[in-house]
Image (cartoon, rainbow, N blue to C red):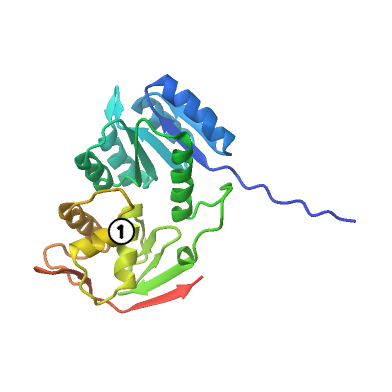
Amino acid sequence: MNTAVPLTRPAPRILVVDDHRKIRDPLAVYLRRHQFEVRTAEDAAGMWQLLQQQSFDVVVLDVMLPDGDGFELCQRLHRRDNIPVILLTARDTSADRVRGLDIGADDYVTKPFEPRELVARINSLLRRRGSTAGIPSAAPASHDTQRHEFAGMSFTASTGTLLRADGTAVRLSTVESRLLGVFLAHPNQVLSRQRLIDLTTRPNHEVFDRAIDRQISRLRRKLNDNPAVPELLRTIWGDGYLLAASVTTYCT
């Protein structure tokens, strides 16, 4: 009699980068108890060395490191490999939050924090990115399995992957994915800046009009939409923005 053996999924790989050992080491222990594979680095040099050795599903990055600015490092990570980043910082001003999200950070956690909150945010980020292996929580929402086709392009929400008309694939940040998802759900409709903020911002996170404008500019570049004369993601002066395209949605 054959007995089925359940497949073992690899644990999500988390890289914790923080120069404070009393934060870094206990956090690594806590994350390992929650079924994550964890590596740590105390500075930017150590982070880059580990990234050359293996891939990671999420980087938890302290904003203030002895050999690098966390905001700049986050931007480099996003541009190089589009690695999901959760910024970890003691600075809790709205300007810092806007800056972090604007440069591509996927989330922002303020010190001091509850480790279980960070675990919840990591799991949420992994689900949004489609990296569900090893996550001991519920299945992802149904909208994560949808594929949208528009203007000769295709967008898969679960992976945040945009397939352009020329066949090139581009990974969007979590914020960019949310923003594009909102436009795809409301094609050919004018959406005000405040409406976009309401639909894309997590609770208790303050975002301003200028941050939305910058995210629109970033999204246009990835859509290959001419920022000087945009044809796809149009600016409706005085009212907001409009996605000028027909959208077909498939459940995969």
Specify whether 51 is left or right of 231. Answer: right
At 49% across and 62% down in the image, what residue appears?
A: 141
Position above or below: 73 against 4: above
Q: Find disc 1 in the rendering and name its residue.
A: 200
Q: Position of residue 196 (x, y in %)?
A: 25, 62
- Closest to the observer, 194 or 80: 194
Three-letter amino acid code of the residue under disc 1: Thr
Specify whether 161 is left or right of 233. Answer: right
At 48% across and 40% down in the image, what residue appears?
A: 119
Q: Position of residue 67 (x, y in %)?
A: 29, 24
Q: Is residue 224 visible?
A: no
Where residue 187 sits, quadrant-wise, is bottom left
- Picture quarter with the N terminus: bottom right
Q: Is residue 4 visible?
A: yes
At 39% across and 33% down in the image, what residue appears?
A: 113
Secondary structure of the residue carrying tag 1 is helix
- Closest to the observer, 76 or 33: 33
Specify whether 93 is left or right of 177. Answer: left
Q: Position of residue 169 (x, y in %)?
A: 37, 60
